[in-house]
Image (spheres, rainbow, N blue to C red):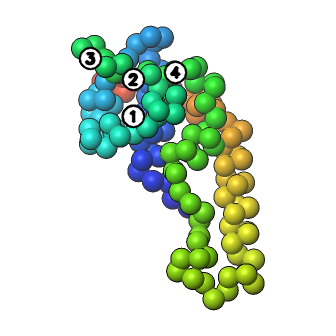
Amino acid sequence: MQLTRFTDLGLRVLMYVSVSAPGEVVTIAEIGQRFDAAPNHLTKVVQFMGQQGWLVNVRGKGGGVRLARPAADYRLGRIVRALERTEALIDCAEPPCVLRGACALKGLLDQAEEAFYAELDRHTLADAMGGGTGEVVVRLHRGG
């Protein structure tokens, strides 16, 4: 299983804005510069996350984005599920599989995918910022 670039950027954005001071906003341009991400792609990610209620998007002069809630409120499994917006790992119907209906693989893959998300759901964005990660992200905020 491989996460999409959309999900990768979404997680990075959440991590980056999680170390901002309360009420402080971060611009898409700043995030794009720090993560070498195209502004148009980043804008789509940020808009989606705003629609999910994860970010507050502030428009106009002095605008940017900030977390809508404390980092400890964001369950990683829920975030990744929403960002991925994908179907099952395999689709037995298209193209039609000759093993359909007599194959255990689909069920096993579905169980494995659910185990993946269940493990991520045990952790929050705040957990992801532990182990020195938060310090590195703070240095990114400072431009270093």
State the SS at label 2: strand
Q: Indicate the quadrant containing the C terminus: top left, top right, bottom left or bottom right.
A: top left
| Cβ atoms at labels 1 and 2 below 8 Å apart | yes
State the SS at label 1: helix
State the SS at label 3: loop
In whole angstroms, how far apart are the C-alphas of marks 2 and 3? 10 Å
Of badges 4 and 3, the one in the foreground is: 3
In whole angstroms, how far apart are the C-alphas of marks 1 and 2? 8 Å
- For label 3, the residue is 60
State the SS at label 4: loop
| Cβ atoms at labels 3 and 1 below 8 Å apart | no
**Residue 124 image position (x, y, % from top left):** 63, 32
First-in-chain label (4 vs 3):
3
First-in-chain label (1 vs 2):
1
In whole angstroms, how far apart are the C-alphas of marks 1 and 4? 12 Å
* Residue type (three-letter) at the residue carrying disc 2: Asn
First-in-chain label (4 vs 2):
2
- For label 2, the residue is 57
- For label 4, the residue is 68
Sort mark 4 into few (<14), some (14-19) or many (20+) by Cα contacts within 10 Å.
some
Sort mark 1 into few (<14), some (14-19) or many (20+) by Cα contacts within 10 Å.
many
First-in-chain label (3 vs 1):
1
- For label 1, the residue is 46
